[in-house]
Amino acid sequence: MDRLGVNKGGFKILSGTANPGLAEEIARHLGTELCRVAVSRFADGEVFVRIDENIRGADAFVVQPTNPPAENLLELLLLCDAARRASAARITCVLPYFGYARQDRKDQPRVAIGAKLVANLIETAGADRLLGLDFHQHQLQGFFDIPVDHLYAAPVLVSHFRKKNLKDLVVVAPDVGSAKMARGFAKRLDASLAIIDKRRPKANVAEVVNVVGEVAGRDCIIPDDMIDTAGTVSEAARALKSLGANDIYVCATHALLSGPAVERLTAAPITEVVLTDTIAIPPERRFPTLTVLSTGELIAKAIRFTHSDQSVSSLFD
Ligand code: R5P
């Protein structure tokens, strides 16, 4: 028990409407049910939340990714505020996907730093801790002044590929920024590493300039933190195919799948697209080569460890 006495009220898992499937899965792994919460809208669309059971003295975990629409973020903030006013002993914001994280610096005149603003809002709403998964940049942890536990979906993705027993494998970083993540995958899968030199002539447009590394005649895995419009991975797959790669697999943690993403992923020379469930994928955004892996068990373990003051990093040993 810590200074807040958080263990005396047990733990409660609360969810907004952004990804109730994942929240239910987390609760199932923890052997509990979701805390009763009502989330609705006023006639004009304003968001309303109410916690429908006693959480006084409880260790509350509010599960909600903040992908668009922005109401997802508002639901999260309102739930934290409601939990604080309902006298929860401690509130942990569980952020399977940190939306607005890409706006992490002032790289053009007169732009907002959305990631910092969202971090401030989460703290102001009452979160005492944050549990996040594959932030766009790891240093975003420093945008929060509350403790942050940062999880990686890599073990979930890697164990999927291990079962395939792929031989003579190359892990291909789709851009220089993903090289560190790709190196981690390559090490775990006993594969070699290649790196794509990607340029963005404008926002959401990706161009492959060069591939550094040997891919001809080999199976390739392209890992990324997120697939948004799928320009990055579909252009990468096309470039690898033109260099003589065999089967090409794509994996990513966060399935934003916006705009032309499904069309691009279906048309590109990709054998399988492996994504996780940090963002709910509606039926109309699913396609035959898509595999969705659950992060529910991983997040549930992290919640259990947080609640019992065990080391969360030991999950990745
Ligand atoms: C880039 O920094 C990210 O890691 C992703 O590669 C990028 O956001 C994916 O965007 P899109 O799918 O639109 O190419």
Image (cartoon, grey):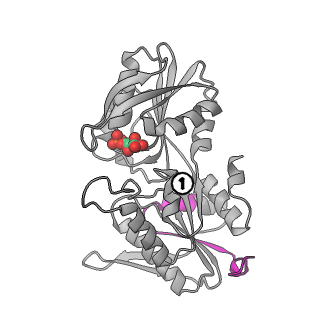
Q: Give neighbour class at mark 1: few <14, some 14-19, many 20+ (Cα, 10 Å).
A: many
Q: Camera-side residue: 213 or 218?
A: 213
Residue to which mark 1 is pinned: 133
Is residue 199 depicted above or below 243 in this figure?
Answer: below
**Image check: 38 left or right of 87?**
left
Q: Residue at x 28, y 74 (%)?
A: 45
State which image quarter holds ligand 1.
Answer: top left
Could you tell me residue 105's position as x and y percent? 37, 56
**Image check: 30 left or right of 135?**
right
Could you tell me residue 183's position as x and y percent? 56, 33
Task: Give the image quarter of residue 232.
Answer: top left
Residue stretch rendered in magenta on the structure? 1-25
Could you tell me residue 83's position as x and y percent? 53, 80
Task: Give the image quarter of residue 101.
Answer: bottom left
Quarter of the image that includes the N terminus: bottom right
Q: Residue at x 59, y 53 (%)?
A: 151
Whether residue 20 is in magenta: the answer is: yes
Can I make out residue 265 in this image? no
Q: Residue at x 59, y 23 (%)?
A: 166
Whether residue 214 is in magenta: the answer is: no
**Image check: 63 left or right of 165?**
left
Is residue 123 depicted above or below 202 in this figure?
Answer: below
Residue type indicated by callout 1: Leu
For label 1, the SS is strand
Task: Give the image quarter of residue 5.
Answer: bottom right
Q: Residue at x 35, y 62 (%)?
A: 113
Q: Camera-side residue: 218 or 51?
A: 218
